Every structure is written in structure tokens, then in C-alpha cells.
Amino acid sequence: MSVTETLAPRPVGGPTLPQERRLVTELPGPRSREVLDRKARAVAAGVGHTVPIAAVAAGGGVVVDADGNSLIDLGSGIAVTTAGNANPRVVTAVTEQVARFTHTCFMIAPYESYIAVAEALNRLTPGDHDKRTALFNSGAEAVENAVKIARKHTGRQAVIAFDHAYHGRTNLTMALTAKNMPYKHGFGPFAGEVYRAPMSYPFHDGLTGPESAARAITLIEKQVGAENVAAVIIEPIQGEGGFIVPADGFLNTLVDWCRDNGAVFIADEVQTGFARTGRWFASEHFGIVPDLVVTAKGIADGLPLSGVTGRAEIMDSPHAGGLGGTYGGNPLACVAALAAIESYEADGLLERASEIGAQLTGRLTALQARDPRVGDVRGHGAMIAAEFVDPATGAPDGSLTARVAKACIAAGVIVLTCGTHGNVIRFLPPLTITDDLLAEGLDVLETALVGA
Ligand code: PMP
């Protein structure tokens, strides 16, 4: 039986899909259940899923399943379809490209779209210095390459990552990622010369930015040695770790320290990049200019693409052939990225992210004022989170968070959790969601919290 037969009828995705929450079965419905039963028999158990549906179409602010249920999308496939699922500009660009050529390997026969993406990244990332870019497939692969480049440039080995960090699931990025379960458990040994420093987490540590930076720098200097540090890598706002926004001055102090000590400052903007926070890159909220910026997710609105962009003298340190890969900067992904960037610019999506942020923050802080289990509301633009705690002790309440998220999903609203203690619900809606749909999603969240 072909996939088309199994899942028919399939609506066309994109913004013309009816923008509504519509449940016609419980989740999963019978058709989705059939597909998920096949998943259990065919797909490795380690590849989990959060929402019990088989998706067949998505666009605007909804995801539609095989039974005709339409769910409000507050996750964007983990911050990827920022410019909207099946965005018409992306669809046109990819459709035209796929009929022209699907692959030549950029390292064998280069093509213009890759170069145009590099030019766009050089233009859009913070700082007006001379820049170069290299493209890859996934966020983790780009992080690995940023570390390779920093090591080659400095001739040093040590890499500093932070508490609550998430940088991926490959061997080096598992070492950089902080949380054991589920990302690292049983998968060691991990790559060497990775050291972990304390993060600035204002809701929990109450420290100023410079105080927490001093704490991290002392650890680096005493336990690693400044002259051994190739790179400091950090998410300007941590994603999987709990949407942790560092206190003002934390990142700036680390950037200054890197400059003074010859280390490369790498901003992992895989989750925060591309209009998500209301700016092109979250680094801009803190006024920092990273040496290298790692991008993925929102860069190509769903096609697999990632990049490392940074100072020309650092990026050009590896020898020819030292960077690359068969698929890196695939032509379909590159034209998708160019179309997505056009959409961010022409459709006013940065401003839209800020509006969404104001709506989310307004509703969640009002909820926090009524319900002390909402300990903290934080984030920028369309990257906002609520952290749930036990009001008596302030301890993280992961089980409440899981119950609320489960109830939201059962009611047709896709929300994602995050945080080292699993006690954070994060909101990452596509920037094409309507105000009404976002408000309805938050109504569902409020009801779920009352019942949890
Ligand atoms: N860095 C950050 C900050 C991320 O959020 C992620 C993905 N959640 C990654 C790296 C890894 O990206 P990928 O899953 O594309 O390898």
C-alpha cells in the first residue's frame, strides 16, 4: 500500500488551510493510530514523538492530521517553520529548483544559490566585519564545524559549554549538551576537552550578569586555563535547557573575555535565529557581536540546512577540503532559505514576532498573577516560556508541566516542554499564526492548567 493510499484524502498545506482548531476524533484518531502502529513496528524506539497524530498538511498556524483533526501549532516543529509551514514563496522556489537539479555536490560543481545564502548570512548576522559562511545540514553538524574552525584558528583544544546547554546529539555535541536523560544516557564515551561552566539563570540564581560571568570565568581560568581555550559556545537564549535568558551583561562580559584571551566566541543561534525573537538573531538583544554564529532551523523554513558564519580570518583558517560534506548546502535547501529570508524581510515577520511576543507575555504574566505555580515568564518575541514550580518550595514541577502539556495536546494545541527539570512550557508559534488562533491556544492552556 502506498503512503498516498494510506493517508488519503490529503489537504494541500500552506496558509490557505482553514485556520481553526477542529477535533473530529480523539487523538490519535483511527487513521493516525494505524500509521503510529506501523511506526512502532518499523521505526527505532529511540525516535520518540510528542503529538499522537500522523501529520498530512500544515500552514498558517495549524497542523492537520490523517483523520482531519486540525491542531493549533505553538511549536513550529521545534522553531523551524518560522515563516509558516509550506510558505508559498518556499513552495514555489523549491518546486522550480527540484525540476532543475536536485544535487551536484557544492564541493564538486558549485551553484549560485549556496553563494547567495552565504552572502545573506554574512549580511544579516551581527557585526559589519568581513565574514565568510559554510553550509551544512543540521544544527549539530554546524556546531561541530564551528568547533573545528575555532580549534584550527586558535591551535587550542578546550571548549567551554554551559549548564543547561543543548547543542545536538552527535558525539561532540552530546559532550557539549548538558542534560543526561534522554540525550546522553548510555551513549558515551563523549568527546574530550569539553568543560562546563555555570550559566546565568536569573530566576534561580538571583545574580547580576557580571556576577555570573565572573563565576564562569573563574572556573574557566582555574580549571581549564585561559591559554587553552579554543572556544566558548553558548546559546544567547538557551532553548532546550528552558528558554533561559541570561542576565544583562553576562554575554557581553564573556565576549570581552574571549577577545582579551584569544578565544573564539561562538553563538549557537540554531533555535533563536531568523526572526524568532523579533530580531534576526538573539545576540542583538544583548548588543553582542559573536566571532562565529551557528544557524539552522528557521533558516530554510523546514528544509534541512545549517550554517556557520563569522569573521573571515577565523572562517578561512581551515585548509581547502577541511570543511564540507556531500549534502551541505543542498540546492533545494538553499533556494528554500533564500525564499524564507525574502519572506522574513518582505512580510514584516520580525515585527510580527514582537507582536506575538507581546501577546504571549501579556497572557502568561496575567496567568502568573493568578496562579503561583507559574513561577516565571520569560523570553523574547515568539520564543516565550513559562516555568512551573511548586509554590510552597519553589522546586521545579516537571510532573505538573507534563500534565498541562498533555492536556493541551489532547485538546488540539501543540505545545512543547523543555528545561533541565522538564518544568518549562515553551511557545514557538509560526509567525504566520493569527491573533485569534494564538489566543485560543492560550485559552486551552489556561483551562489545562486549572484542571492539572
Ligand atoms: N543547537 C541548538 C540551540 C538547538 O536548539 C538544536 C536543536 N534543538 C541544535 C543545536 C541541534 O540541531 P539539529 O537538531 O538540527 O542537529
Image: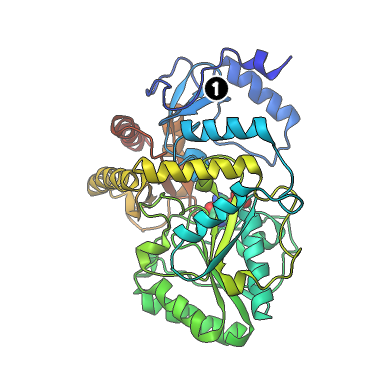
Vertical side of 434 occupied by 398: above or below: below
Q: Quadrant of residue 33?
A: top right
The residue at 35%/48% (across/down) is 350
Vertical side of 361 occupied by 69: above or below: above
Whether residue 394 sits left or right of residue 35 in the image: it is left
The residue at 56%/83% (across/down) is 262
Query: At numbered mark 1, what does the secondary structure look like: helix, strand or loop?
Result: loop
Circle 1 residues within 10 Å: few <14, some 14–19, many ≥20: many
Whether residue 366 sits left or right of residue 80 in the image: it is left
Instruction: Report which residue position mark 1 lands on.
Output: 28
Q: Position of residue 327 (x, y in %)?
A: 71, 47
Residue 235 in sight: yes
Vertical side of 72 occupied by 281: above or below: below
Q: Position of residue 269 (x, y in %)?
A: 50, 58
Query: What quarter of the picture does the N terminus occupy?
Result: top right
- Pick the front one: 436 or 418: 436
Q: Position of residue 254 (x, y in %)?
A: 46, 76
Q: How many marks?
A: 1
Mark 1 residue type? Pro
